[in-house]
Image (cartoon, rainbow, N blue to C red):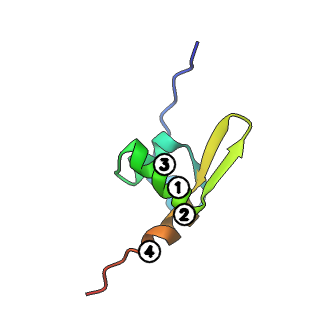
Amino acid sequence: MPRSRTVVPQLEEKISKGQKKFVRYAEGAELYSVGLHTFQEMAKEAGAIYRVKRCVLVNTQKIDEYLENFCDAN
């Protein structure tokens, strides 16, 4: 029987303070305000995926660096 995921309170605050460097796909999609599939693709392209047994973690620092490449400096 699958377990339900717990919601991390103040997720954005913890990441900005450096208390939480890795997130799961669902947390990351919520954090970056994108869909789950889009976040999974971004994480793969950024090389930010870490697999620990059956758990997939995404490095938020690598995602941030990846997103900076799309900055439109007008």
On screen, residue 47 versus residue 30, left or right, reads right
The alpha-carbon separation of the residues under discs 2 and 1 comes to 5 Å
Residue at 52% of width from left, 55% of height from top?
43
CB atoms at circles 4 and 2 under 8 Å apart? no
The alpha-carbon separation of the residues under discs 3 and 4 comes to 17 Å
On screen, residue 42 versus residue 22, left or right, reads left
CB atoms at circles 3 and 1 under 8 Å apart? yes
For residue 46, the mark is 2
On screen, residue 24 versus residue 26, left or right, reads right
Residue extending farthest top: 1
The alpha-carbon separation of the residues under discs 3 and 1 comes to 5 Å
CB atoms at circles 2 and 1 under 8 Å apart? yes
Circle 1: element type: helix
The alpha-carbon separation of the residues under discs 3 and 2 comes to 10 Å
Mark found first going from the N terminus, 1 or 4:
1
Q: Using a 10 Å C-alpha cutoff, classify the residue at mark 4 as few (fewer than 14 neighbours), some (14 to 19) or many (20 or more).
A: few
Give the labeled residue for mark 4: 68
CB atoms at circles 1 and 4 under 8 Å apart? no
Residue extending farthest left: 74
The alpha-carbon separation of the residues under discs 4 and 2 comes to 11 Å
Q: Using a 10 Å C-alpha cutoff, classify the residue at mark 1 as few (fewer than 14 neighbours), some (14 to 19) or many (20 or more).
A: many
The type of residue carrying mark 3 is Gln
Circle 4: element type: helix
Give the labeled residue for mark 3: 40
Q: Quadrant where the C terminus lies?
A: bottom left
- Determine which quarter of the picture holds residue 61: bottom right
Mark found first going from the N terminus, 4 or 2:
2
The type of residue carrying mark 2 is Ala
Residue at 69% of width from left, 45% of height from top?
51
Q: Nearer the viewer, residue 65 or 10?
A: 65
The type of residue carrying mark 4 is Glu
